[in-house]
Image: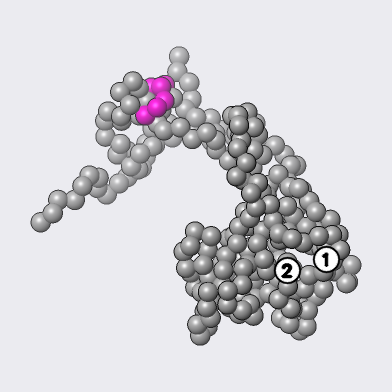
């Protein structure tokens, strides 16, 4: 009797492939900027959240509201940060890209104004302001790729805390299991040709696919691997 493929078992949504409930402690997002001036907040607590590799910081503002942000390297409890159109360029402060000088390290960068921060959020991660050109700001991402963003996008000043944590050796597969399971990520990812025939359409002793990998868009979930409804496969002939 056969058994379901791993992709079918994951699609079922059982507990074995689902993030444990109520494990994330906080959502990281930017507060709306004040119309004028700046909002000043004080770091009152650090949070170790399984959903983030970098530590988080809880910030309490002068109006007694609170927000959770990604902590920068070097900040401590009691330090003050600023947010707003006229905020100063200081560690952990949140500013628009158009107000940040060239060469400054930033993290938790918005790709579109108001999206709450999408890139350079991992522990030790940072991006760099390269230049301001007319109505765009050139930013170098951690991958060294240059992109142009809207000056109204926001970012935090500094580098995300926790750098070096990801360089520690995991040592054993059991620890890796809990690291990835906490964030509902698929691990380990095995190549299909390394699986048994009952586990994957490409599986078997031969260690190569053994047949065409092009499949119909209407193929059942267990067989829908490889080149799905590809227009063409193989090398293009010159001439």
The answer to whether one can see residue 152 in this image is: no
Quadrant into which the C terminus falls:
bottom left
Residue 195 shown in magenta: yes
Looking at the rendered structure, the secondary structure element under dot 2 is loop
Up the image or down, 189 lies above or below 39; here it is above
Residue 195 lies left or right of residue 28; in this view the side is left
Q: Residue at x 54, y 35 (%)?
A: 187
**Secondary structure mainly formed by the magenta segment:** loop
- What colour scheme does the image use? one colour
Residue 209 shown in magenta: no
Which residues, given as a range, are shown in magenta?
A: 193-198
Up the image or down, 42 lies above or below 134; here it is above
The answer to whether one can see residue 17 in this image is: yes
Up the image or down, 80 lies above or below 200; here it is below
Find the residue positioned furthest to the top. Answer: 1
Q: Which residue is mark 1?
A: 79
Tags 1 and 2 in contact by the CB under 8 Å rule? yes
Q: Position of residue 75 (x, y in %)?
A: 77, 61
Q: Residue at x 78, y 79 (%)?
A: 38
Residue 153 lies left or right of residue 144; in this view the side is right
Q: Position of residue 98 (x, y in %)?
A: 60, 80
Quadrant into which the N terminus falls:
top left
Find the distance from the CA under tag 1 to the CA under tag 2: 9 Å
Find the residue positioned furthest to the left. Answer: 239
Q: Position of residue 14 (x, y in %)?
A: 62, 31
Q: Which residue is mark 2?
A: 91
Viewer-closest of 17 and 102: 102
Viewer-closest of 70 and 90: 90
Q: Residue at x 27, y 49 (%)?
A: 231
């Amino acid at each position: 009797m056969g058994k379901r493929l791993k992709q079918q078992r994951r699609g079922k949504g059982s507990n074995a492939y689902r993030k444990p409930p109520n494990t994330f402690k906080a959502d990281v997002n930017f507060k709306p900027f004040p119309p004028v001036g700046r909002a000043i907040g004080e770091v009152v607590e650090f949070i170790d959240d399984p959903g983030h590799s970098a530590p988080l910081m809880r910030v309490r503002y002068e109006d007694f509201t609170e927000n959770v942000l990604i902590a920068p390297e070097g900040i401590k409890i009691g330090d003050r940060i600023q947010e707003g159109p006229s905020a100063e360029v200081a560690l952990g402060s949140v500013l628009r890209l158009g107000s940040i000088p060239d060469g400054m390290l930033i993290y938790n960068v918005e790709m579109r104004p108001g999206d709450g921060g999408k890139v350079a959020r991992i522990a030790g991660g940072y991006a760099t302001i390269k230049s301001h050109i007319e109505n765009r700001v050139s930013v170098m991402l951690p991958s060294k790729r240059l992109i142009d963003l809207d000056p109204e996008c926001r970012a935090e000043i500094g580098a995300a805390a926790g750098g070096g944590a990801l360089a520690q050796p995991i040592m054993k597969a059991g620890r890796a299991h809990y690291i990835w399971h906490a964030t509902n990520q698929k691990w380990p990812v095995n190549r299909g040709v390394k699986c048994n025939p009952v586990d994957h359409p490409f599986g078997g002793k031969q260690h190569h696919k053994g047949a065409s990998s092009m499949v119909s868009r209407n193929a059942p979930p267990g067989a829908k691997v490889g080149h799905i409804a590809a227009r063409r496969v193989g090398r293009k002939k010159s001439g």
